[in-house]
Amino acid sequence: MNKQELFNKFDNDIAKRSRFMRLLLATDQWFNVLLKNGSQDETISSYTGRLIKSGNGRWYDCLLCKILNRFEKDHCNKSLGE
């Protein structure tokens, strides 16, 4: 990815989400690093979804996805890659 493509990606991300939603996303990613030792570029839902899909999810990972499913059906699977 060249610099211009990267700048366009950033501009698209800003245009796509409000400042508040970007703040929530950054907070989610921060908690992923803090609590799960996951990637700074991935949300807790995505990380947890990958753990469950690979068969390495623990009971509390399944519980988190069940809780999130109350807000959005199949949330952890939909968030894969975020």
Image (spheres, helix red, strand yellow):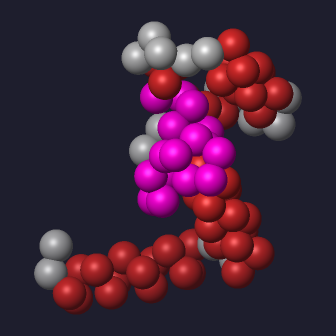
- In front: 20, or 42? 42
In the rendered structure, the answer to whether residue 38 lies left or right of residue 28 reads left
The quadrant holding residue 8 is bottom left
Query: Above or below — where is 46 with respect to 34?
Result: above
**Percent position of residue 76, x then y:** 61, 32
**Percent position of residue 29, x then y:** 59, 57
In the rendered structure, the answer to whether residue 33 lies left or right of residue 53 reads right
Q: Residue at x 82, y 27 (%)?
A: 67
Count all numbered tags in the image, as a single digit. 0
**Percent position of residue 42, x then y:** 49, 52
Q: Residue at x 57, y 73 (%)?
A: 16
The quadrant holding residue 9 is bottom left
**Residue farthest along the left direction in this orientation:** 2
Magenta highlight on residue 12: no
Identify the image quadrant of the N terminus: bottom left
**Percent position of residue 80, x then y:** 48, 38
Q: Residue at x 56, y 81 (%)?
A: 15
In the rendered structure, the answer to whether residue 14 lies left or right of residue 22 reads left
Region of the chain picked out in magenta, as a range: 33-50
Q: Residue at x 20, y 87 (%)?
A: 3
Q: Is residue 79 visible?
A: no
Magenta highlight on residue 38: yes
Q: Is residue 22 visible?
A: yes
- In front: 31, or 8? 31
By secondary structure, the bulk of the magenta-drawn segment is best described as helix
